[in-house]
Image (cartoon, rainbow, N blue to C red):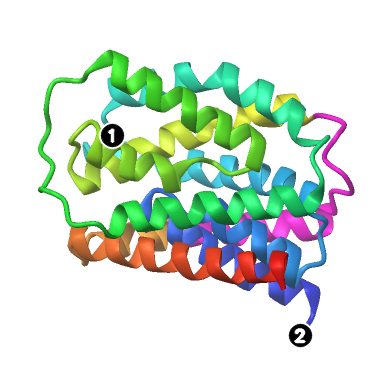
Amino acid sequence: MSELVLALAAGAVVGLALGALGGGGSVLAVPALIYLLGFSPVAATTASLLIVAATSATALYPHGRDGNVAWRTGALFAAAGIGPAFLAGAAAGRVPAAVLTGAFAAVAALAALRMLRPSRAGSAKRVRPVKAAGAGAGLGAVTGFLGVGGGFLAVPALVGVLSLRMRQAVGTSLLVITINSLAALVARMGTGGDLRWEVIAPFTAAAILGAWDGKRLATRITGVTLQRIFASVLLAVAILMLADVFF
């Protein structure tokens, strides 16, 4: 299968995940770039930030239009994460590839298990600034270090810590992803490895189109089902990546 077809197919899947689930795009983009398209771990995490930032910014509009973005909560998350994302992004280029891949897989597995745990249904409540800022700082650090948008951690945090409804958490996470990804990209300037734009460009275009289809898909599936699908995909990817590191 040609490189262009692989890039288009992987981009479409990443876009569907971001549009429907508000996260999971980068946790799918990074292994796709490494294992399907031959990127190094450092180059893959940097390219993933570019792809996910562009796709998330595009997908944010329809979620905001439908009232599924908690702007104040998202702003607190994003503002708290900018500094950690920048610092962690600058440090990531000095970490061995195997360590970066193993850390990525471990964080994805923990996020998946957290979302699979039974929890009480969330409802919109008063935003707790300290919790929002603390969670946002942690998400920013993960975004910068691992080259992920942070949505696969933002969604469970917004549901479990701040009690947002699943659909509102999905929309709000896109705001957080966009800002954190851009901050991490600034820190990674000049250290991203070989960025092959002939792959990144079609990957991003397919992801943007896929995100619109993902948004429509989300209106046909319950929030609980979305959460389970999201967690199951994360766990499968994490297991495969951990196996690659240790075996």
Q: In the figure, is residue 167 to the left or right of 52?
A: left
Q: Name the residue under label 2.
A: 1
Number of the label disc, if any, that sits on residue 69: 1
Indicate the quadrant where residue 88 lies: top right
| Amino acid of disc 1 | Val
Indicate the quadrant where residue 134 lies: top left
Determine if the magenta segment contains residue 168: no
Label 1 neighbour load within 10 Å: few <14, some 14-19, many 20+: many
Q: Which residue lies furthest to the bottom in this view?
A: 1
Is residue 225 in view? yes
Question: In the rendered view, would you say 193 is above or below 184?
Answer: below
Residue 59: percent from left, percent from top:
43, 46
| Amino acid of disc 2 | Met
Is residue 43 in view? no
| Alpha-carbon span between mark 1 and mark 2 | 39 Å
Question: In the rendered view, would you say 244 is above or below 109?
Answer: below
Question: In the rendered view, would you say 99 is above or below 129?
Answer: below
Question: Which stretch did the figure color magenta?
Answer: 189-210
Q: Which residue is drawn at 82% across and 40% down?
A: 192
Total labels: the figure holds 2
Q: Residue at x 38, y 18 (%)?
A: 133
